Image (cartoon, helix red, strand yellow):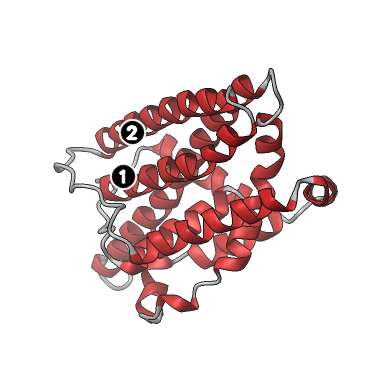
Amino acid sequence: MQPDAYILTELKSWQHQMQKRPTLVDALSKSVQNRINAIIPEKVHTAITTVIKKMVQGVLFGAQYTSPKPPPFNSFTELEAAVDRRIEFYKNAAAAEGGITGAGGFLAAMADFPLLLSLKLKLLFDIAALYGYDVKDYKERLYILHIFGIAFSSQKHRRAVYYQMEGWDDKKAGLPDNVSDFEWRSFQQEYRDYIDLAKLAQMIPGVGAVVGFVVNYRMLKKLGLTAKNAYRMRLVQQLEKTEKATTPAGKH
C-alpha cells in the first residue's frame, strides 16, 4: 500500500515538529510546571507515580492489553479511516469518563488516572494492530511506550525519544530481550509533569466536570495523532527500504 501525498506531507510536518529544539517558551513552561508540582500534595504525586509504574509494568509484562488482528485493507486510505474511527471512539469514551469523574471532586478525579491511562493504552494497542504490528511482541510494546512518551513530554525529552524511534525496525533487532532495561522512572516523571496542571484543575469544585471532559478529549486526540504519525513513519521507512532493495543497481 502506498500512502497518499497528503499523508506524506502531514508526516514530514510532524517529524519536523518532533525534531525542533526547545525554545525559551518551552523552558518557561517547564519552570512553571515545576512550581506547580511543588504545591501539589505529595499524596497526589505518590498516587500518580504508583499508577504509572504499574501501567508500564502492565504494558511490558501483562496480557490485559491485546487487540485482534484486523482484516486486510485495500488501500492506505482505508486503513487510516479505520484508525480514525478508533481514535474517535476513544476520544468520546475518555471525554465522558473525564466529565463523570471530574464532577465527583478530588477522590473521583484521582480515580480518573488509571481509567484514562487504560483508555490511552488500549487506543495505542488498537492502532498498532490496525497498522499490522504484533502487539504480543515485547519490542512492539516498547515502541508503544515510546509513542506514549513522545506525546506527553517536554520538547527536550520529545526530541530525544523521537531519535530513539526513528529507524525502529533496524534498531529493534539489537534490543535486549530483558525488559528491565527500560527507564520507566524518567518516563513516568515526564508524563506526570505533563498532566499535573490539567488534573489539578479537574479537582476544583464546580469546573472539574468541564475540565475533565475537555482535557481527556484533547489528550486522546493528541495521542491518536502522534500514534498515526509514528506508525506512518515506520511504514514509509519500510517502503523506502524495500524500494531501494528492489531497484536495479545504477537506478537509485
Relative placement, left or right, of 207 versus 218 is: right
| Up-down relation of residue 51 to residue 122 (above or below) | below
Q: CA distance from mark 1 to mark 2?
A: 8 Å
User: Could you say whether the residue bearing mark 1 is in a helix, strand or loop?
Assistant: helix
**Image mark count:** 2
**Horizontal side of residue 174 vs 25, given as left or right:** left
Spot occupied by residue 110 in the image (x, y as percentages of width and height)? 58, 40
Q: Residue at x 84, y 45 (%)?
A: 32
- Amino acid at the residue labelled 2: Arg
Q: Which residue is mark 2?
A: 86
Whether residue 28 appears in this view of the structure is yes
User: How packed is label 1: few (under 14 Cα within 10 Å), some, or many (20 or more)?
Assistant: many
Task: Residue 21 in the image: state x and y as whole percent.
Answer: 73, 56
Q: Which of the two discs, 1 and 2, labels the residue nearer the N terminus? A: 2
| Residue 189 image point, x, y percent | 65, 59
Q: Quadrant of the C terminus?
A: bottom left
Asked whether residue 19 appears in the rendered view, the answer is no
Query: Which residue position holds label 1?
Result: 126
Query: Label 1 is placed on what type of residue?
Result: Asp
Q: Are marks 1 and 2 in contact (CB under 8 Å)?
A: yes
Return the residue nearer the eye: 170 or 128.
128
Q: Residue 248's spot in the image, x, y percent?
A: 25, 69
- Please indicate whether residue 1 sits to the left or right of residue 218 in the image: left
Q: Residue at x 33, y 29 (%)?
A: 85
Compared with residue 247, is residue 98 higher up or lower down, i.e. above or below?
above
